[in-house]
Amino acid sequence: MATSGIFIYGIVPNFYGAEHFRSLEKAGVSAIPLQNISAIVLNGEMESMAVSNGESTAKMLELYHNTIEQVIALGFYMILPMKPGTYVNTRQEVIAILAKGYDLFISSFNQIENMTEVDLTVTWSNFRELLKDLASHPEIVELRDSIIKKNRCFSQSDHVKTGMLVREKLNEKNKQIELKILNVLTSFSTNLKLHEVLNDQIISNAAFLIKRNLKDKFIQMIGQFNEEYCGILNFKLTGPLPCYSFYTIEVKELSPEKIACAKRELGLNEEPLEPVVKRAYLNYARLFHPDSHRDNGDEERFKRIRMAYHTLLEYSMAVKQSSEIESATLINEQNIKKMFLVKVKD
């Protein structure tokens, strides 16, 4: 399903020259500025990630990454990527987001200056051969021999038990290799983020935040690991990249209706700032938590209370995030009724 609006790809500082910003047309995007920063945006239609199927989501993500790569190739080497699929309805809402997150954007630019991300995936070259080697592990041999001695044949539960032990030894081996590699590579990086490992063949899937002047040394170290493991392991390096894993920006829209509903759920009439919200949540949680009141506990009510609590915490964070720039920018924008929370994605 196509969604019309203004799609925000990322935020850049405004110290680039006018020619740089004019060149954005080559990537099919434009800039909406506010003081020292600009949003890189696309006006038009795009498949919404929330409702699209797997194929169209993949195409949208490909467009997102390709566009950011084009923007960087045009000379915008310092960019804060926006969470894929972030869009708003009007230019005024883009400016509202720039104003709301202004201080966060400036501090993040200071953090990523001269930094880049490099992603590394380490896998087994011949996983089937590895499993054969694991089958000769003393503990696995002992377990197999004891089963044969006792039953003379393997039952389904015996196969499960053996498989679990093989997986345990595989995990131990993977963790040992991963720690060895990470201990060396983290000396070249300022931050590390481990991504989800999707199957047993993958030993490690990690993102490193490194200084640009250490990138070549980092790559050389990967080459040394490649020689050490001599075809046993595959090392796939991706980068340099924008700091996707460390500084992707997420925007949450907080509707007045949702906030009002959350206030009613927690019995609040006053401005729901953080201390007030926490106090109200604790009071209601004691009354309705199913574990504390097995006879009188209301699980559905407790879920609503917890949801209201998180909604109002986000609201209090958004209020706290307000700045002088936001007030000055939006003072004449009476048509902006939405409240946004701008944060670095968890």
Image (tube, grey):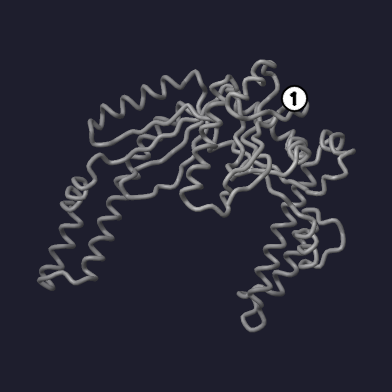
Residue 247 at x, y percent in the picture: 59, 36
The image shows residue 115, relative to residue 304, as above or below, that is above
Helix, strand or loop at label 1? It is loop
Quarter where residue 127 is shown: top left
- Residue at 67% across / 18% down in the picture? 16
Label tally? 1
What's the residue at 78%, 60% (across, down)? 257
Depth order, front residue of 60/239 = 60
For this orientation, the residue located farthest to the right is: 332
Which residue in the rendered view is the most extreme toward the bottom? 295
Quadrant for the C terminus in the image: top right
Q: Position of 318 compared to 162: left or right?
A: right
Viewer-proximal residue, 320 or 198?
198
Residue at 15% x, 51% y is 136
93 left or right of 243 in image: right
Q: Residue at x 31, y 29 (%)?
A: 225
Residue 59 % position (x, y)? 49, 42
Q: Which residue is mark 1?
A: 36
Residue 178 shown left or right of residue 186 in the figure: left
- Image coordinates of residue 115 in percent, x first then y, are 55, 25
Above or below, comparing residue 209 to residue 203 in the picture: above
Q: Amino acid at mark 1?
A: Asn
Residues 30 and 220: in front is 30
Say above or below: 338 vs 300. above
Q: In the displayed structure, does residue 268 sit left or right of residue 120?
A: right
The local crowd at label 1, few if under 14, some if 14 to 19, many if 20 or more residues have their Cα within 10 Å, is few
> Could you say which is closer to the camera, residue 251 or residue 303?
251
Q: Position of residue 121 (x, y in %)?
A: 38, 37
